[in-house]
Amino acid sequence: MYRKYVKRLIDIILSLTAIILLSPIMLIVYILVKVNLGSPAIFTQRRAGLYGEVFTLYKFRSMTNETDEQGELLPNKMRLTKFGKVLRSTSLDELPELFNILKGDMSIIGPRPLLEEYLPRYNERQMKRHNVRPGLTSYTAVNGRATLSWEERLEKDVWYVKNVSFWLDCKIIFKTILTVLKRENISSDRGKFMGNNVGKINDKKKNGV
């Protein structure tokens, strides 16, 4: 009941309320991004969501569009400005994802949405992380995200899918607030996930893990 209906209802209520209350802050951040980094202020990227279906993720841009002599984008570290680091450390860059939640692409709590290109790289167990909507924050994010290997991170995602409940989500929200305030485990650079075995997308009719 909670996983199918209550969780989605809570997502709609909380995301809509947050959008209304935080709209002045989002407008200010939007203007600051335009001034400091230029256009577009909103960064979009294709991510894998529920059952592996791909959607467009929205975030505030935190990097420049600087390129090398061949016209290729410079490495992320070189394009991430001090302003961008502040956006990331405060999680302000994540605010546009509230619209993804309202649309139904994401949830408040769930495994973080990863790149579309990772889909064929998961093994069968790791693919189970897609049996729930991806989240704005996650069990993994508040349990050592910055120090975890890809395998450990994905294993925690699968654990969440198996154990999702109202009380677990409440604990994650509380720990997320503390993590953001302390600026702990905000980001990590473990490189891209290259996979281990070829995974398959779960059938949409399957509700279990």
Image (tube, helix red, strand yellow):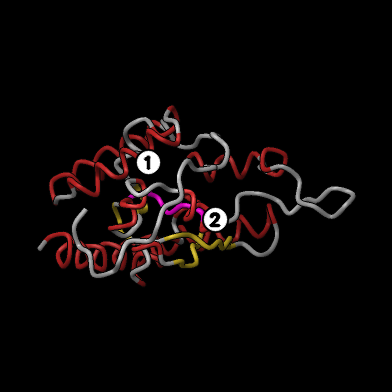
How far is mark 1 from mark 2, CA to CA? 15 Å
| Residue at the limit of the structure toward the right, as seen here | 69
SS assignment for the magenta stretch, majority:
loop
In the image, taking residue 204 as reference, residue 121 lies left or right, namely: right
Q: Which residues are magenta?
A: 111-115
Mark 2 = which residue? Answer: 117
| Residue at the limit of the structure toward the left, as seen here | 1
x and y percentages locating residue 43 in the rendered image: 58, 60
The amino acid type of the residue labelled 2 equals Glu
Vertical placement of 151 versus 96: above or below?
Answer: above
The mark nearer the N terminus, 1 or 2, is 2
In the image, taking residue 153 as reference, residue 132 lies left or right, namely: left
Q: Residue at x 29, y 45 (%)?
A: 158
| Residue at the limit of the structure toward the front, as seen here | 197
In the image, taking residue 111 as reference, residue 91 lies left or right, namely: right
SS type, badge 1: helix
Which of the labelled discs sits on residue 154, or is there none?
1
Where residue 113 sits, quadrant-wise, is bottom left
Q: Residue at x 28, y 58 (%)?
A: 132
The amino acid type of the residue labelled 1 equals Leu
x and y percentages locating residue 5 in the rendered image: 16, 67
Where residue 1 sits, quadrant-wise, is bottom left
x and y percentages locating residue 131 in the rendered image: 28, 58
Report the front residue among 170 and 46. Answer: 46
Q: Residue at x 61, y 62 (%)?
A: 41
Which of the labelled discs sits on residue 69, or is there none?
none
